Image (spheres, grey):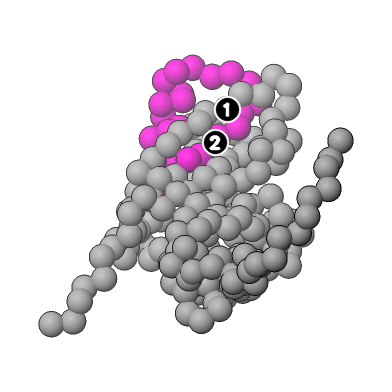
Amino acid sequence: MLLARKRVAGKDPWKAKTWYTIYAPDMFDKKEIGETISDKPEKVLGRKIETNMKEITGDLKKSHIKLIFRVKEVTGENAYTEFFRQELSRSYLRSQIRRRNSKVDSIFNITTKDGYNLRASTSAILTTRILTSQKKAIREVINQELKSISTNNDFAQFLDEVTSGKMSSEIYKKARKIYPLKRVEVTKIKLVDKPQVKEAA
């Protein structure tokens, strides 16, 4: 049983806090994606917020693409973010695997044309089981295609290739020559390191 407690006069801690509006990165049109509360702006820095591509674009078909951003700057009551991670929802990935299907999961380290280091996870879905040598060949094709796309695109362009589905489609076209795949998904992209901004002399 809950016991009634006398209200003690004093400062309301919530009144001392400020609500900050959170915005997506430039590459996602700086769309307003949420709010967070804090008593100090510096405590907002580094906070992560999750949204999805449907909230960014309004396209219901992209609700399975999760986006995680990290607050990098606070100006007034506005918090601006940077990309941290993109991944496909578990429910979506489960829906792509049918009975007797198999998959080839891979993780690759890649670098974009403008120097962003990323870790990419992919999943090639097959209608049956395959040999180890075929798995190795599929991974090699995916690795080559990822490196080709990353070295020829800057960070923003690369993420657009991922979230639009173009990258998965291009990788699929190349990998299916090894074995008739059902589909290829780029399941996760994580920012590992970004280029340092050079200070003016």
Image location (x, y in percent) of residue 195: 28, 63
Q: Is residue 118 above or below residue 83?
A: above
Q: Amino acid at mark 1?
A: Lys
Q: Is residue 89 left or right of residue 140?
A: right
Residue 95 vertical placement versus 60 (above, below): above
Q: Label 1 near label 2: C-beta < 8 Å?
A: yes
Quadrant containing the C terminus is bottom left
Which is nearer the N-term, disc 2 or disc 1? 1
What's the residue at 49%, 64% (across, down)? Answer: 44
**Tag shown at residue 123:** 2
Mark 1 surroundings: few (<14), some (14-19) or many (≥20) residues within 10 A: many
Which stretch appears magenta? Answer: 121-146
At numbered mark 2, what does the secondary structure look like: helix, strand or loop? strand
Query: Mark 1 — residue?
Result: 103
Which disc number belongs to residue 126?
Answer: none
- Tell me which residue sits at (47%, 63%) in the image: 43
| SS of the residue under disc 1 | strand
